[in-house]
Image: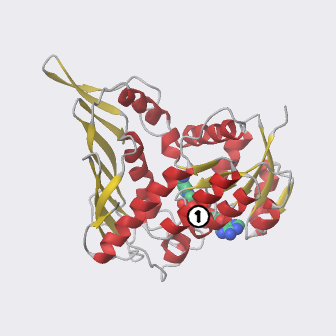
Amino acid sequence: MSKVKVGVIGAGSISDIHLSSYARNPEVDIYAICDLNEERARTKAAAYGAEKTFADYRELLADPAIDAVSICTWNNSHAEISIAAAEAGKHVLVEKPLCKTVEEAEKVKQAALRSGKVLQVGFVRRYGANTALLRRFIEAGELGDIYYAKASCLRRLGNPGGWFSDKERSGGGPLIDLGVHIIDLCWYLMGKPKVRSISGNAYNRLGNRANINNLSFYKASDYDSAKNTVEDLANAIIRFNNGASLVVDVSFTLHAKQDEMTVKLFGDKGGAEIEPGLFIVSEQHDTILNVTPQVDQLGFDFASGFQSEINHFIDSCLGRKETLSPVEDGLEVMKMLCGIYESAEKKREIYFD
Ligand SMILES: NC(=O)c1ccc[n+]([C@@H]2O[C@H](COP(=O)([O-])OP(=O)(O)OC[C@H]3O[C@@H](n4cnc5c(N)ncnc54)[C@H](O)[C@@H]3O)[C@@H](O)[C@H]2O)c1
């Protein structure tokens, strides 16, 4: 059987985990790599045995040998490249966030539906083993009706700079970069209820705190301490049509004692945590139980989560599975992210039809 020929567009940090996961899938041929910086593309092509390199993604998409692409570029080109790839008849795995605006997301959705090809959004957390396990419990009714979720991803000091802190290229700060994962994870596990209203706040009170000494953090390769146009904290309450609510807060920097990553869901029969690790709370015989599953990994494992995302994408390209993270979901998540920014800007709650 012939292999799925894959092209990877954007050869920066995250492309490595796409490429190493493709390399471990026996049904994939890593065929081409593209980056604006062609030297970067060439280095990765040599490392992963790709035949071709390009500096212009349009040339990569024009190659009829390519069946599928991973889009690992800055957020400002996700929509444009996804649309062009769908129009060129390629299956698409686009990194999160789907794009920068709801209008762009609508256009990507139309292009993907027109093409009839797979469009998978890189909501990698959906593919984690702990998420799959919790989903089984939820589908079996162990939590009952989930009416509240609460998620925090707070960095004390962690604005990566570079394109991440350039609103033009990123679309925003911690909300669009980190919030996208935890909002999607809650929404997915809550059963994807329809959004009714959003009240959000965004702050840029601390800047990027390039002055801080003696505490290290990840910096993008093009870090420039003088450049920062994104928020440093955002929070929101999202109400859904089924009465459920989601409370979220995310930061690149905050005067907090320590970093925090928590994701909790509460239902009328039980509760659960998925971050920092899988944990279930239930009630039996008039007694509250704290349940820790005996599994290899309670937390999210980056390598196996990505492997499972890539394998699922390839199975979808081969028509064996439906993607777990379709373009429609990417659009709904964009509505929530952009709704939070809009509410913050207007300083009032906003409503959806
Ligand atoms: N799923 C996750 O957990 C996760 C983690 C990190 C990053 N990401 C996402 O992956 C994407 C890339 O992030 P990164 O950390 O690898 O950034 P990066 O800066 O390390 O790499 C991005 C690369 O894309 C290239 N590029 C940008 N625009 C391009 C274009 N139009 N054509 C060709 N190449 C282009 C840049 O030259 C750069 O080499 C972002 O959308 C980010 O949100 C996802």
Residue drawn at x 31%, y 72% as measured from the top left:
344
Residue behind mark 1: 107
Q: Establish if 10 lies above or below 132.
A: below
View extreme (bottom): residue: 226
Q: Establish if 30 lies above or below 307.
A: below
In the rendering, at what x and y percent does residue 62 appear? 83, 61
Look at the numbered disc 1 and say if its residue's Cβ is closer than 8 Å to ligand 1: no
Towards the viewer: 352 or 81: 352
In the rendering, at what x and y percent does residue 257 appear? 26, 58
The picture quadrant for ligand 1 comes to bottom right
Residue drawn at x 21%, y 33% as measured from the top left:
268
Towards the viewer: 49 or 309: 309
Q: Give, as a three-letter code, the residue at label 1.
A: Lys
- In-image side of 75 versus 232 (left or right): right
Residue 66 visible (yes or no): yes
View extreme (top): residue: 285
- In-image side of 352 versus 90 (left or right): left
Residue 216 visible (yes or no): no
- In-image side of 318 versus 209 (left or right): right
